[in-house]
Image (spheres, rainbow, N blue to C red):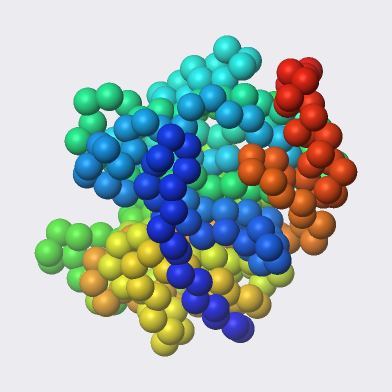
Amino acid sequence: MHIQIINSRPSSDGAGVKLQRVHGFRDNSLDPFLMLDEINSDNPDDYIAGFPPHPHRGLETLTYIRAGGFEHQDHMGNQGKIREGEAQWMSAGKGVIHSEKPLLGQNALHGFQLWINLPAANKMQPAAWKDIPLSELPWQKLQTNNADSSNGSHASVKVIAGSLQLQSQTYSGPLQTTAPTRVADLQLPANQNVTLDAVSEENLLIFVYQGELIIQGQSVGKRQMAKISDAGTLQLSATENTGMLILSGQPLKEPVAHHGPFVMNTAEEIQQAMADYQAGVLTD
């Protein structure tokens, strides 16, 4: 087992939205994941302008909201709103043009957008989109290894995609991404720990968005990501109330060519995507 700590970095995107970013475009080190962005602010000036209409090709996005809300519109006529605890999936395939804007009247926004690579065989498939409502994304309580619920706090997990093995039990979510992945939000009270049975041939990523996590004796702080290779069975321990995203997926092991909103396999395919967009035929 090898644990690598990756620091997120402040960045901005869209119409000046402030965020924290972790990406692996240069060396495809997060395969099949490409990038994770976190928006977390109680100042609307940091995010209210959102992401005006823009294109994508060759990837999928998974957006998950913990506070506030987001609205999606695209060239296919889709329009949807997601709020606290809900998620949204979009497969750009051969091409999509969409916008994403925070819902008005919110005093804070906390959410994540995950970019997932599409296999080469699926990069030119038709675009698709759907919202995943709260009714399909319940919090599920976990019995921790040293449970003490006298203070009313419980460990809980929300599985969005795929399934996870926690405490020798399987927890499943409603979404299956094209490149199969596992995506979950795990909340662990202070001084509690749980066992995660990871799939050893998958890349396992754990991003801590609150508190501090100890993984097999290795500390992972707020806004840090742990990349874990050959994970097997892990003990996850919280030194304080801790929240984390757990991401796991089988590496595609395909070449990655990236330019802005386009992710393909070759530079020639990127050039074609740019030409298609400029000619107005990206989504045809």
- Toward which corner of the image does residue 149 lie, by quadrant? bottom left
Residue 67, placed above or below residue 198: above
Q: Residue furthest bottom?
A: 217
Q: Quadrant of the N terminus?
A: bottom right
Q: Left or right: 48 with respect to 37?
A: left
Q: Which residue: 42% across, 87% down?
A: 217
Q: Which residue: 13% across, 66% down?
A: 150
- Toward which corner of the image does residue 262 lie, by quadrant? top right
Q: Left or right: 131 with respect to 135?
A: right
Q: Which residue: 23% across, 72% down?
A: 240
Residue 55, placed above or below residue 169: above
- Toward which corner of the image does residue 222 lie, by quadrant? bottom left
Which of 258 and 72 lies nearest the eye of the viewer?
A: 258
Residue 48, placed above or below residue 35: above
Examine the rendering and report whether any part of residue 132 can be seen: no
Please provide percent x and percent y for residue 29.
66, 66
Q: Which residue: 56% across, 35% down?
A: 89
Please provide percent x and percent y for residue 107.
20, 36
Q: Quadrant of the C terminus?
A: top right
Q: Left or right: 125 with respect to 218?
A: right
Please provide percent x and percent y for residue 121.
85, 41
What count of labels does the image hold? 0
Which of 98 and 205 lies nearest the eye of the viewer?
A: 98
Please provide percent x and percent y for residue 151.
12, 64
Examine the rendering and report whether any part of residue 262 can be seen: yes
Residue 152, placed above or below residue 12: below
